[in-house]
Amino acid sequence: MTRLRNLVLVLGDQLNTDSSALRGFDPGRDLLWMAEVAAESTHVPSHKARTALFLAAMRHFRDDRRNAGWTVNYRELGEHEHPDLAAALSATLDDHSPERIIVTQPGEWRVLAMLRDTAKAADIPLEVREDKHFLVALITFSTWLKGRKAPRMEHFYRWQRAETGILMTDEGPEGGHWNFDSENRHRFDSQGPGMLPAPVSFEPDEITRGALDAVREHLPANPGQLDHFDWPVTREQALCALDDFITHRLAAFGPYQDAMWTGEPWLYHSRLSAALNLKLLDPREVIDASVSAYRDKQAPLASVEGFVRQVLGWREYVRGLYWNRMPEFAEANALGAEWDLPAFYWTGETDMRCLAESIGQTLEYGYAHHIQRLMITGLFSLLYGVRPEAIHQWYLGIYVDAVEWVELPNTVGMSQYADGGFLASKPYVASGRYIQRMSNYCEHCPFDPTKATGERACPFTTLYWDFLVRHKDRFGRHPRTALMWRNLERKPEGFADRVTTAAGHLREKIAAL
Ligand code: FAD
Ligand code: SF4
């Protein structure tokens, strides 16, 4: 019998048929390998919808490849006894003893290390191929990063615009500016957003229903709900979701990208992150579609540039930083934060309306938009002083789009400032007044965002001033943050002591908040 040539691994977030691992695949000599293992959903507790999304998309991919005549060795959850990926892979290596293992660069440092260890233990060479899904190769990013003390996203983004020619003219950036923030970042007036275009919804087919059942049966204790599951799980559905966003929501994306409103989880956001991260969509086609909408006068430049900035800028930038700074990145705790994650992050049961809304919809859908993540759940964690590792694990499990290369830099770097300012030039801190300005949450809340102390004091506002007091030495003279600390100095005598005491009481009664 001839020996198996290549065992080609496809991980749950590598579902593009043009992925580099699949190049040169010979159905006569190679075997495709995929596995569903419980440990990937329990090493951090994964939202049921997140796991169901991965399983449903993987099963569709498996069937697509089988229909193309490929042999796929696929282990479904519950069909095998292997507790984790390493055990499942070792068993296959024992059975087939391939000449080589091939994989596209995984999305998580832990998984890459595990694959290397497993291949080494079996004494079979492992070939890790570059992930061509991304526009910027890791080596290119490393070259750009080299020698930069403060590698800001803005510099990376402008460089990428120039390199790719996206939204560029011979004279410079399209419209004469690199960003149009002054036209964006509006709030809704007191009437709210009004009638919103409902995003396209994908009714689970038989394969997806099987994945939902598997999660119900094998992971009943995991957080989150499955009742509203309607995410795209195939390439065709992902393309339909892209078209739906471009046609119905992109035009208003820019102005309202920072706004929040009770009971409205999607607003004008694209909901494309999960499809992108599973590689059902290519970022180039997403960018092209939005730029075409601008050229066809379907969407204004401010919205299109704002959207391109997220995909070409932030998404590529955080990935580059992740691979350059792991594994130390995961251990960073520059502000010495040491509190546990409050229990309400897992239930949404708190009187603080902004948190109850943002966490409630997260548990319902596995989704919150960027400002809810950064300026509600992330902000509370930062001000309260949650251990970065604890909040990182929550974000890694709780969102359908969570894969560590994108989640960790956003959490540890951007949101928690745990990397000491490598990613973000300043900590994203604000009081409850920011939330009051950008949403209607405070209208339905027992707390008052203008009050830092007293019975109705808003916990965000108390903790904001407490944060300034606690970190005065670190940021008080920092050029980008000094203004906030000057405001602290202008407060009446005794204010700093009063907020310190109020913050202490708040920490004592956190379970009852
Ligand atoms: P839109 O608002 O429509 O944005 C368009 C696209 O731009 C997104 O689909 C996404 O691919 C990309 N994008 C936007 N912001 C970012 C960003 N900061 N970093 C990287 N890409 C971005 N995004 C994830 O994909 N996975 C995560 O696990 C994740 N964790 C996060 C954790 C924290 C603490 C924060 C503050 C942000 C996190 N983000 C993460 C970034 C962002 O919040 C999500 O990409 C976005 O909310 C997804 O919804 P959407 O597709 O409707 O995005
Ligand atoms: Fe959140 Fe404070 Fe507003 Fe309540 S008052 S919704 S806790 S910001």
Image: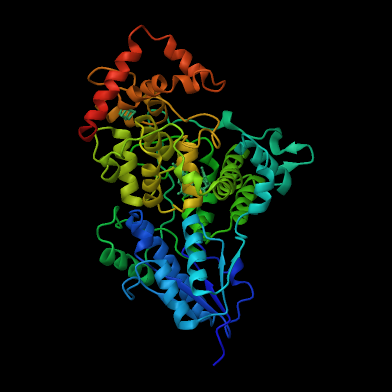
The reply to whether residue 167 is visible in this rendering is no
Query: 511 above or below 243?
Result: above
Q: Quadrant of residue 488?
A: top left
Q: Quadrant of residue 455?
A: top left
Residue occupying the point 28% across, 32% down: 352
Closer-to-camera residue (111/256): 111
Q: Is residue 496 left or right of residue 485?
A: left
Quarter of the C terminus within the rendering: top left
Count of number-bearing discs = 0
In percent of width and height, residue 180 lies at 61, 33
In percent of width and height, residue 252 lies at 52, 40
Closer-to-camera residue (455/353): 455
Query: Can you name the residue that lies furthest to the top here?
Result: 493
Query: 197 above or below 84?
Result: above
Closer-to-camera residue (91/355): 91
In percent of width and height, residue 259 lies at 44, 34
Q: Is residue 472 left or right of residue 499?
A: right
Quarter of the N terminus within the rendering: bottom right
Residue occupying the point 64% across, 75% down: 24
Q: Is residue 224 left or right of residue 308?
A: left
